[in-house]
Image (cartoon, grey):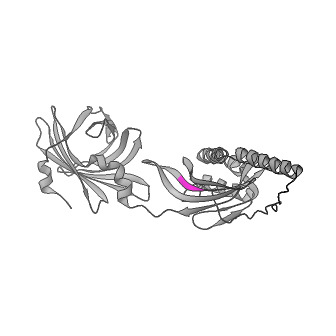
Amino acid sequence: MLSKHTLAVFLTGAILLAMPPAYCASKDKSSSKSKAGKSSDAASTSVTNSDSEIRAHLTALSSAASNGDVEKMASMWAVDGVYIDADGVQTSGRDAVQRRFSEGQAQGRKAAISLTPTSIKFLGPDAAWSEGTVMRQSSVGMEPSTRFVMVLQKQAGKWYVASATETPIANKNASDHLSAMEWLVGDWSVDGASKVRMHGEWTGNKSFILCKFLIDKPGQPQRTETQIIGWDPTKEQIVSWNFDSNGGFGYGTWTKRGAQWVVTMEGVEQSGSRTNAMNIITLSGPDKFTWQSVNRNIDGVPVADGDALVVQKSLKTSSLTTDRVN
């Protein structure tokens, strides 16, 4: 259904419309009436061809693409419509476009997509031009994926895609993807039966966020943990690596769900036991979040959920900043 970059939609080429020759206005009444009639027709065309029609068409196309409805997508193309993907591969004809969309769906390239127009212009009573951005669902929400340019034709009162081209958007740096995690930078603390101090900072030219933890639990030796958060371009997802002073280590994948970040964790303890858990981080504002570990197991044996911990941002600089890793 989609190119490897995103939606299998959009365009190339231009449509040249043969416009009727202008008529010279006459000074007699019949000529004035004719001119008035033409003005009325022009006004009618202007009302009929509103931006809302084109936006509605793009919304319907986005919905069909998001739902993997290749037949509905193809039906919105002209019989001789053309699609050129972000790699420059051209597909011509409605049937060929449908086959292209079907192949994309078979390869698992289904994702929520939104065509967001930045400009809409009418080239005549039966033709329109639009350009904008293809937004695609990722682990951090809807993100720009490609640019599109599209020409649409009106046939029997209905709009169809005559041609569409996608062009790549310059690759993002890791820091662009991690900008959604910037709230984590700073000093944080948990005060209760267990005390936790955490310091988060940018590192590696903002390609990673480094978090260092100091953990005090009653009856246990003080423990430190290090977490590195980064962007995995192969998964198009935020990931993390964890290391603790007992010799254990782990790996997590981060998914944003509204005000929550859900981190699916797997790890290995110093003893060799394998662990799995889901950590849920619920944001309550820029200076507070709740952290809880659930669905936990060790070597496949279920373990009780952890307590929900309230984590507060501290105005004081943590002593952990004196031992930074750059």
Tell me: 140 left or right of 121: left
Quarter of the rendering occupied by the C terminus? bottom left
Residue in view at x 87 percent, y 49 percent: 29
Residue 110 image point, x, y percent: 57, 50
Residue 31 among those drawn in magenta: no
Q: Compared to 250, does 279 lie above or below? A: above
Seen from the viewer's position, the closer of residues 122 and 182 is 122
Prevailing SS of the magenta stretch:
strand
Residue 217 image point, x, y percent: 14, 37
Residue 133 among those drawn in magenta: yes
Seen from the viewer's position, the closer of residues 322 and 275 is 322
Residue 256 image point, x, y percent: 40, 43
Seen from the viewer's position, the closer of residues 134 and 112 is 134
Residue in view at x 37 percent, y 47 percent: 254
Residue in view at x 66 percent, y 66 percent: 90
Can you name the residue that lies furthest to the bottom here?
88
Residue 150 image point, x, y percent: 64, 58
Q: Compared to 164, does 214 lie above or below? A: above
Q: Compared to 323, does 13 lie above or below? A: below
Residue in view at x 24 percent, y 34 percent: 310
Counting the numbered discs, the total is 0
Tell me: 144 left or right of 76: left
Tell me: 109 left or right of 301: right
Tell me: 23 left or right of 60: right
Q: Which residues are magenta?
A: 130-134
Seen from the viewer's position, the closer of residues 87 and 107 is 87
Quarter of the image holding residue 325? bottom left
Can you name the residue that lies furthest to the front here?
27
